[in-house]
Image: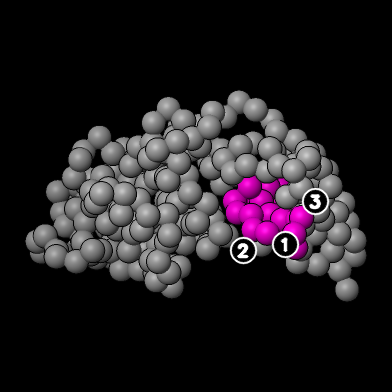
Amino acid sequence: MNQRHKIDGQPAFVLHAYPYSETSLIVDVFSRDHGRVALLARGARRPRSVLRGVLLAFQPLEVAWAGRGEVQTLIRAEWQGGQPLLAGKALFCAYYLNELLMHLLPREDAHARLFSIYAETLRRFAEGAREADLRCFEHALLQELGYGLTLEADVAGAAVDVEAHYAYEIERGPVRLPGPGGSALAVSGRTLLDLARADFSDPRSLVEAKQLMRTLIGHYTSGRSLVSRRIFRELQEL
């Protein structure tokens, strides 16, 4: 049986929340030292609850909780400030990050480095969402979860050639091709090296990296359709 414990003063962000009874919420938070945790926020839906204006996505919080089992009890949540509210494209990009974390990050699996990268990415989004920031976060997420990409050497152990063409084999790495490939996992050597360096100044690298990362994430999420991606695509079509 899990023993009851208390955690206090923990930096965190809300990833997702949904109603629980008429007055409460279940809140999924990403905490710095305890990873993704599900918390019961009692009375958070009441009009006068101090939590109503605090449990907002993409805002830095300091939280405390106690309990045992899969869902523990939120004791306190305080807004830490410093993060502007997101809107437009930046908001949809941030929801995409949260969906990735909800689908891929196991509960109570601490990733302090990923937490810092997530917070920094949100700060960048406040200045204007960029495709490059999404690719960097996706790459960091896969690395942190143990799905790190092999980008600077091919499966034969040879250094990736900036002028060569490759097919990226999931769980193995780049396989050199005699010429350009036609699949979603076909990339240039330049794209692989640019992704390793987080350098997306070459437009072609940005396009190919997006295609590659989308295919890899589809693999690791078992082909789940991401709601944020679908909504953003529909808005663009409108």
- Please provide percent x and percent y for residue 153: 31, 56
The three-letter code of the residue at mark 2 reads Pro
Which disc number belongs to residue 71?
A: none
The three-letter code of the residue at mark 1 reads Tyr
Q: Residue at x 64, y 36 (%)?
A: 60
Which disc number belongs to residue 20?
A: 1
Q: Residue at x 43, y 59 (%)?
A: 227
* Dot 2 alpha-carbon crowd within 10 angstroms: few under 14, some 14 to 19, many 20 or more: few
The three-letter code of the residue at mark 3 reads Gly
Q: In the image shown, does 40 or 107 lie closer to the viewer?
A: 40
Q: Which residue is mark 2?
A: 106
Which quadrant of the view contains residue 107? bottom right
Q: Which residue is mark 3?
A: 43
Q: Residue at x 80, y 51 (%)?
A: 43
Q: Residue at x 48, y 49 (%)?
A: 95
- Indicate left or right for 215 with 69 as reference: left
Earlier sequence position, callout 1 versus callout 3: 1
* Dot 1 alpha-carbon crowd within 10 angstroms: few under 14, some 14 to 19, many 20 or more: some
Tell me if I can see residue 64 in this picture. yes
Mark nearer the viewer, 2 or 3: 3
**Secondary structure of residue under mark 3:** loop
Range of residues picked out in magenta: 13-34
- Indicate left or right for 166 with 36 as reference: left
- Please provide percent x and percent y for residue 30: 64, 50
